Image (cartoon, rainbow, N blue to C red):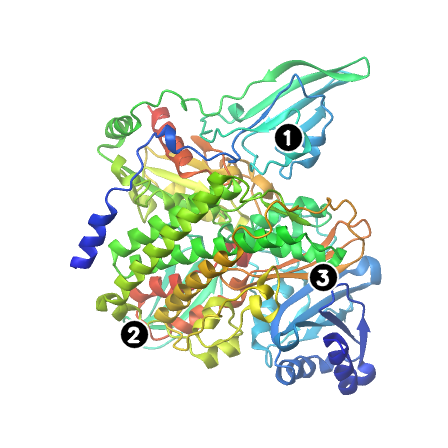
Amino acid sequence: MDAAQKYRDQMQLTWGDRIRVHPAFASNELYITLAPGALGDLEEMCGGIQKSFKARFATLVASDERRETGFLFLYYVFSIPSDDLFLVIRVPVDPRHMEVPSISGTVEAANWFEREVKDWYGIIPFPNIHPLASHPDWPEDVLPMLKEFDGRSQVPRIARRADFSHVEGEGIFEIPVGPVHAGIIEPGHFRFSVAGEPIVNLDLQLYYTHKGTEKIAEGARVARCVPLAERISGDTSFGHALAYCHAVERLAGITPPPRAIVIRTMLLELERLYNHIGDTGALLLDVGFSAGAATAFRLKEDMLHLNEILSGSRLLRGIAALGGVRREIEETLHKRQAFRDTTVKVHEEFRQLIKLVQSSSSVLDRLETTGRLSQKEAFRLGIIGLAGRASGIDRDLRRDHPHCAYSHLKFAVAGQTQGDVLARLTVRVHEVEESFRILEQLVRQREAEPYASAELHQIPPQRYALGYVEGWRGEIVHWIKTDHMGSISRWKITDPSFHNWRALPAAVQNNIVPDFPVINKSFNLSYSGNDR
Amino acid sequence: MFKILRQSIRTGVVTRPYPDESSGPPPGFRGKPVIDFARCTACGRCADACPTGAITLRDADDKEGQKLLSLSYGSCIFCGACEDACPDAISLTREYRLATGQKDALTVEALYKEEAGKMQFVRITAQETVGETARGLEDIGAEFRSRIHELFGRSLQIREVDAGSCNGCEIEITALTNAIYDIERFGIHFVASPRHADMLLVTGPVTRNMEIALKQTYDATPEPRLVVAVGACAISGGIFGKSYASCGGVDTVVPVDVYIPGCPPRPEALLHGILLALGRKK
């Protein structure tokens, strides 16, 4: 009995006629539609899935399907790692009564997702109604993701003050930071409440880099959006592009040739490597270990240079393609030699660097116990990816929902339980080791085989599927629905940062302000991936 | 301590000289696309394939049967989709130092006329001059120092402003400070406040939510100030264009002195653009 069947039977046994099975186009997805009138059961149903199936909340997609069905839909996506299945609860929303019960009382991980849906679609997840995506000067009645909103229109600013959570009491001060930061980083606003040095509360205002990515893709040809996917988050160019390609391939029922899968896996690991090595350097810089930081940045530069040799782009852009990859990465002696020389050199020097770090008590002292995120809190907030693995959340899509070539590869999933800055650094160090191990297994496999399937001219209309990869930060989940022409009707992008930004206010509590940069860096979350 | 010293000595000097012709981009690098107008038949396949609208084909005003094909390096993201669509007439070169002070200089345009049922190339109607000083940069380091000395006295202070980029440009700007590119050897420093800055290095299409912050940052920068727009988004909105969320380029919000094409520009391209900006300020 396949997994989808098993869970379908279980759901039907529990919920009877309050649910209907909806067709799916990818084999490991199961869609269940909530019957009209069963809206009151939503929270209990989602809580039950989370608890009895050991499922993890993956994303919440809203989709305006009024033209086809007269309804808007919410898709609550849960991942069930034990059976490699995605269970999706599909909830119709009547446009005359745009309100659903919030599930975030039971599934806390859905909190931000619900608030974004309210700001962009006007669907009220009662009582979770505090704005998230809309800035104070955005008019509340303008809902950019509804189909009738023209993405090219200009929206007037209204006068309204930002509403941050306040802490009151003797000796409490507020420190506003951003959106233009002191370093060369992305924009966002942090509002600290401090009692002397220790941070009592941190509130965030993000979405400064909101570029309307999901809106401008509406109605676009599917192949045209691969470069757009590469620009969701610059440091995850390939990861996002690949998640996008996966979604399209899954809804169209296409399997890329084996060589393409090998190349994709290698590129994904190369992306992980340059980011993990760079982050190691940034962490060392923030605790004042300049010699170590300089070494790590030099190694990162070596990896970026290797990326350019192999793919033509330092950030691995312009190589992802639907149905395969756009070019070979190991076809010349020069490339193969550069690959071998660089990986051997960087691997060895990175090991030396880590030995140096481990022998430096002044560095370790700054990293240990700083910015602790407990396993309980990480689990409650639904923290994923490397930040989750540093706090004892044993989750890695490469193992739990095998994609690319990972089911044929030997690698260990990193895991720490301390949840402090050092744990997040240690997870990175272990993953660097594993990435080199994975690359060793993949190099020069299946050479001279085709790396692209015939171009996808015909994308089937009215289909939908998830696409996912384990990027270097964590799981990247896209959901695509095509319209009656086979163009994009809805493209939902979930960057791991969207889950993990909520870890930051929890982790900085009771730490001192001067430690904030290193705590923030240890998560290194994407603003652009979050804001899109 | 001794371990660190030993490692430093073992590593030696890794900084790459600039300009260094030997360390240019490797084969397969996707730089400036060039259209061979004589071979082009103005079929429009490239314009159709271009994801950012950098290549356009349109009817010439008031002239029947005539078409204009234009390519803007300000919107190009160097993906190579045009080359894939038309390998006969379009090729991506390895040229990447494309900075310029004039926005017009980013566009090349050619006129086509229908003759015997085929589109024939007539003439180039607008000529790009990107990378105007890319050649002849003999001793760029010395030039840097002397220009900075004239203008700002000893050093140039740069404030980087991310006005909604994808973080790609930031990766390359950050790379300028590593030991390989070591921008500080030219007397250039990145500073934490616009009040300390001589130059704003702005990335991103300027989102609606960053528009006010960018204006305020510009106003906080003392005169004489330079503004450099980095990357396709900052020049034209790039792949994000102009929308409810995006202003469509830095010069829609604050005046820009130099444009650096690229998506993102390589670190050497950034160095070239920064030098060009210094050369323009009298």
Mark 3 vs mark 1, CA separation in Å: 32 Å
Mark 2 vs mark 1, CA separation in Å: 60 Å
Tag 1: residue type? Ile
Residue holding disc 2 = A171
Instruction: Give a yes or no on whether discs 3 and 1 share a subunit.
Output: no
Q: Please, what secondary structure does the residue beneath circle 2 have?
A: loop
Foreground mark, 3 or 1, reads 3
> In the picture, residue B223 is in which quadrant?
top left
Foreground mark, 3 or 2, reads 3
**Residue A452 in the image: above or below residue A131:** above
As drawn, is B281 to the left or to the right of B98?
left
Q: Please, what secondary structure does the residue beneath circle 1 have?
A: strand
Quadrant where the C terminus of chain A lies? bottom right
Q: Position of residue B201 (x, y in %)?
A: 40, 40
Residue holding disc 1 = B55
Q: Are marks 2 and 1 in contact (CB under 8 Å)?
A: no
As drawn, is A8 to the left or to the right of B258?
right
Which labelled disc corresponds to residue A142?
Answer: none
Residue shown at 69% from the left, 27% from the top: B57
Tag 2: residue type? Gly
The chain under label 1 reads: B
**Residue A64 in the image: above or below residue A299:** below
Q: Are marks 3 and 2 in contact (CB under 8 Å)?
A: no
The chain under label 3 reads: A
As drawn, is B103 to the left or to the right of A242?
left
Foreground mark, 2 or 1, reads 1
Which labelled disc corresponds to residue A465?
Answer: 3
Q: Tag 2: Cα neighbours inside 10 Å, few (<14), some, or many (≥20)?
A: few
The chain under label 2 reads: A
